[in-house]
Amino acid sequence: MNAPTLCHDEYEVLSAVVPLAGRRIVELGCGDARLVRAVLARHPDCRVTALEVDAVQHAKNLAAPPTPGLTFVAGGAEAVPAPDASFDLALMLKSLHHVPIAAMGQALAEAARVLVPGGLLYVSEPVYDGGLNDIVRLYNDEGTVRAAAQAALDAALANGPWTEIVRHRFAQPVRFADFAEFQRRMMQSSFATYTLNDALVERVRAAFMPHCGADGAAFERPLLVRLLRREAA
């Protein structure tokens, strides 16, 4: 298999496969909404509704300087607070595997409901592979949920109003100045609580440090994009 394309900014991948001008967009699980802010900076005629289920992150989003065209809403992908056929494009950026496994099918059904016929669902999911994954799985093994996310997409394609039109693998470079930054960014997130103790933290540190040089630790995070089109009923 060829090595995945290296891409610093996922906007490049998104804009290559989706016409973005004038789109009504919903992001399901927006985090800090970095990518949709980039979309709006380049396409101010877009309108984005960004859902976030994590109350801490949602409060940070509301407190940040407003971005024209961007509206934040508290809510999860399983119950999108929007009428049928409200959007042209739905985004799930590293978020489907965070949906409870039993609710993944419902989340994809909700995406179908709120998209217009011909609307697009862009799903970007981390691949269970690579050096960074080997470290993170010591305290947060996502093998099961990542596989479930792909299985949910396969089931939605088999049973729902979807056609897959793009499948693309790429990798994002990730850099940490030191282990303290890794801890802050990867082990102390507000949307997840990990069971940590001193011995486990030391195991993670021991796995991290061989990657760390004078300019920090550099990794490549592999991701898989699947672009689905919502067909007419």
Image (cartoon, rainbow, N blue to C red):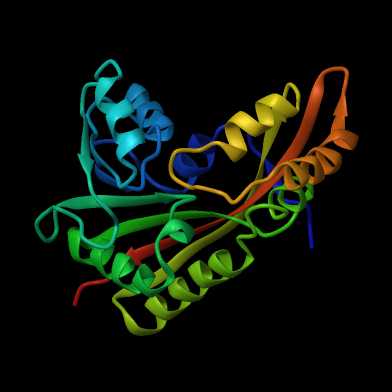
Q: Residue at x 86, y 40 (%)?
A: 206
Q: x, y (%) of residue 184?
A: 60, 29
Of 59 and 49, the residue lying toward us: 59
Which of the image's four quarters has the N terminus? Answer: bottom right
Q: Return the x and y of residue 198 as percentages of the image width and height.
A: 73, 41
Give the image quarter of residue 106: bottom left
Left or right: residue 142 versus residue 202 is: left
- At x 88%, y 17%, the residue is 214
Q: Position of residue 53 (x, y in %)?
A: 31, 47
Query: Above or below — where is 103 with respect to 6?
Result: below
Give the x, y percent position of residue 190: 44, 38
Residue extending furthest front?
Answer: 198
Say if residue 119 shows up in the picture: yes
Q: Quadrant of residue 35?
A: top left
Residue 230 visible in image: no
Q: Quadrant of the C terminus?
A: bottom left
